Image: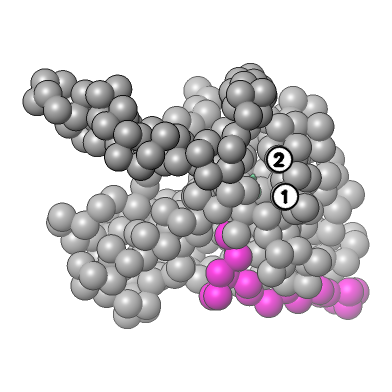
Amino acid sequence: MQKTEIQEFAARISGTQSKAADTRVKAIVDRVLVDIFTVIEEFDVKPEEFWSALSYLTELGRSNEYGLLAAGLGIEHFFDVRLDEKEAAAGIEAGGTPRTIEGPLYVGGAPVAIGEARLDTDPDDGEILFVDGQVTDTTGRPLAGATVEVWHANTKGNYSFFDKTQSAFNLRRTIKTDAEGRYRFRSIMPSGYGCPPAGPTQQLLDRLGRHGQRPAHIHFMVSADGYRQLTTQINIDGDAYLHDDFAFATRDGLVPAVTHHTDPSALKDRSVDRPFATITFDFALPHAVAGVPATLIDRPRAQVG
Ligand code: BEZ
Ligand code: FE
């Protein structure tokens, strides 16, 4: 088909000539159809290839991997970059902690603790990890009573709730900052996540010649009244995939130093019986501004309780 024929056909299908119904949906369906028809023309896509693509998408849904593929194709990161640009254009104050993708493995309803928490409820002989920091505004003023939601994988790279061998909320907590805006927690050093090797996301990544690995990381959602909510992650320095994340989520400013401690007196001070690591990471939140797109995306999330 010629370009004009494609455009006319897509317009008939999407009903762009009539005023009725949803004009935004019509315009987007129209563009998507023109793009699909153009790809079929340009690459001479065979009907067999098209039906195989539909079967792939059916399997993607059956495996609940749409969120995984969206991350692996960089679409979740793309939305982060767009939000950065919108904030800059709207004059949102600089100096806030960089955002990065939420990923598909958040679960709402984690136990709430004041000031400090222990995240590892299941036995795991990974390296003991202590993380602490302060939540402030962009001038360094502490934000008491801020909410720090934290979640991460175990040493096998798996997340509780999705991995049914772990207890509910293992490695997930909500911590309210103390009077000085501080939070702290004890946990175990996570390992990086890898896409299910037999799943449809990895299947496509294989065809692209890409791996499906993420560097070890810890997720945070930080919020305080009057400030812009922050969704972000810190990456564990030294991980082989630190700058080769299949989900494109590593960003400058999100790789804090990790200190490993073996000194017996340090072990005694922390009341632990084996070497441990520490990370300090502070969060800075810009003030909320009316009329700027929200940072917390309205999307389906698992919720327990
Ligand atoms: C994760 O945060 O572990 C994750 C992010 C994107 C895709 C898959 C996993
Ligand atoms: Fe993760």
Left of 88 or right of it: where is 183?
right
Q: Residues within 10 Å of mark 1 (few under 14, many from 20)?
A: few
The region drawn magenta spans: 249-266
Q: From what the image shows, is residue 194 above or below residue 291? A: above
Position of the N terminus by quadrant:
top left
Q: Quadrant of residue 162?
A: top right
Left of 37 or right of it: where is 293?
left
Residue nearest the viewer, comparing 213 with 8: 8
Badge 1 marks a residue whose secondary structure is helix
Residue nearest the viewer, comparing 117 with 203: 203
- Residue 71 in picture, x, y percent from top left: 57, 47
Q: Are marks 2 and 1 in contact (CB under 8 Å)?
A: yes
Left of 95 or right of it: where is 148?
right
Q: Quadrant of residue 128?
A: bottom right
Residue 204: assigned label: 2
- Residue 300 in picture, x, y percent from top left: 45, 30
**Dominant secondary-structure state across the stretch colored magenta:** loop
- Residue 212 in picture, x, y percent from top left: 74, 49
Residue 259 lies within the magenta run:
yes
The structure residue drawn at horizontal position 89% and vertical position 74%, both measured from the top left corner, is 262
Residue 204 lies within the magenta run:
no
Is residue 268 in sight in this rendering? no
The residue at label 2 has a CB less than 8 Å from ligand 1: no
Q: From what the image shows, is residue 229 above or below residue 4? A: below
Q: From what the image shows, is residue 186 above or below residue 36? A: below
Task: Find disc 1 in the rendering and name its residue.
Answer: 208
Q: Amino acid at mark 1?
A: Leu
The residue at label 1 has a CB less than 8 Å from ligand 1: no
